[in-house]
Amino acid sequence: MPASIDFARLYDDHAQALFAFLLNLTRNEADTRDLLQELFVKLARRPDLLHDVREERGFLIRLAHNLAIDVMRRRGTREKNHEQLAAEMPNPFAPSTDPDEQAFRHALAKALAELPPEQRAVVHLKLWERWTFEQIAAALEIPPNTAASRYRYGLDKLRDLLRPLYEEIK
């Protein structure tokens, strides 16, 4: 990437996907906004981070993931995050006027919230970003087999959590 970075283009091209990814991880809109701002401030201070980056989105997802993990670690144990999640669970899906669609989206958001963050991150990138396991592995700095197993375990948990809804509408 050139020495001067077009932050407006970078933001326009990637902010929506980064926001969705971070919201899925943090489950908190205020934290997500803070992390997104922190990410772009970091890039403004260190534009050299983007030099020689071939996959912008992958690199930005990795930065976002690392920032989110740092925030979770700073806050303490996973139990504290789980309590916060139970208290406020934002819906990462767009609203719908169809009541059945809205009920399904709510159930899916609730089920996603019950996944461990590492599984939720992989499931999000695979389903919503349509990334390969190799891309996910590179972004999250894990082996491709780990990405695949986290995806499989996440889908198994989602299937179990959503089974009652499926049985109801069958």
Image (cartoon, grey):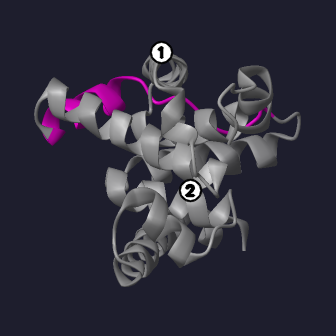
Q: Amino acid at mark 1?
A: Ala
Number of numbered discs: 2
For image coordinates 38% across by 80% down, the residue present is 149
Residue 161 seen: no
82 drawn magenta: yes
For image coordinates 51% across by 66% down, the residue present is 136
Instruction: Assign the C terminus to one quadrant of the image.
Output: bottom right
Q: Is residue 133 above or below residue 75?
A: below
Q: Which residue in the rendered view is the most extreme toward the right?
A: 97
* Residue at image mark 1: 30
Q: Position of residue 93 (x, y in %)?
A: 69, 39
Q: Amino acid at mark 2?
A: His
Left of 149 or right of it: where is 44?
Answer: right
* Range drawn in magenta: 78-95
* Residue at image mark 2: 124
Q: Judging from the image, what secondary structure is the residue with disc 1 in? A: helix
Left of 119 or right of it: where is 103?
Answer: right
Q: Which residue in the rendered view is the most extreme toward the front?
A: 3
Left of 134 or right of it: where is 66?
Answer: left
Q: Which of 3 and 103 lies nearest the eye of the viewer?
A: 3
Q: Which residue in the rendered view is the most extreme toward the left?
A: 77
Q: Which of 8 and 114 lies nearest the eye of the viewer?
A: 8
Q: Judging from the image, what secondary structure is the residue with disc 2 in? A: helix
Q: Position of residue 32 (x, y in %)?
A: 49, 25
Q: CA distance from mark 1 to mark 2?
A: 19 Å
**Within the image, what quadrant is residue 131 found in?**
bottom right
3 drawn magenta: no
Q: Position of residue 159 (x, y in %)?
A: 51, 72
For image coordinates 34% across by 50% down, the residue present is 117
Left of 86 or right of it: where is 46?
Answer: right
Q: Which of 84 and 132 lies nearest the eye of the viewer?
A: 132
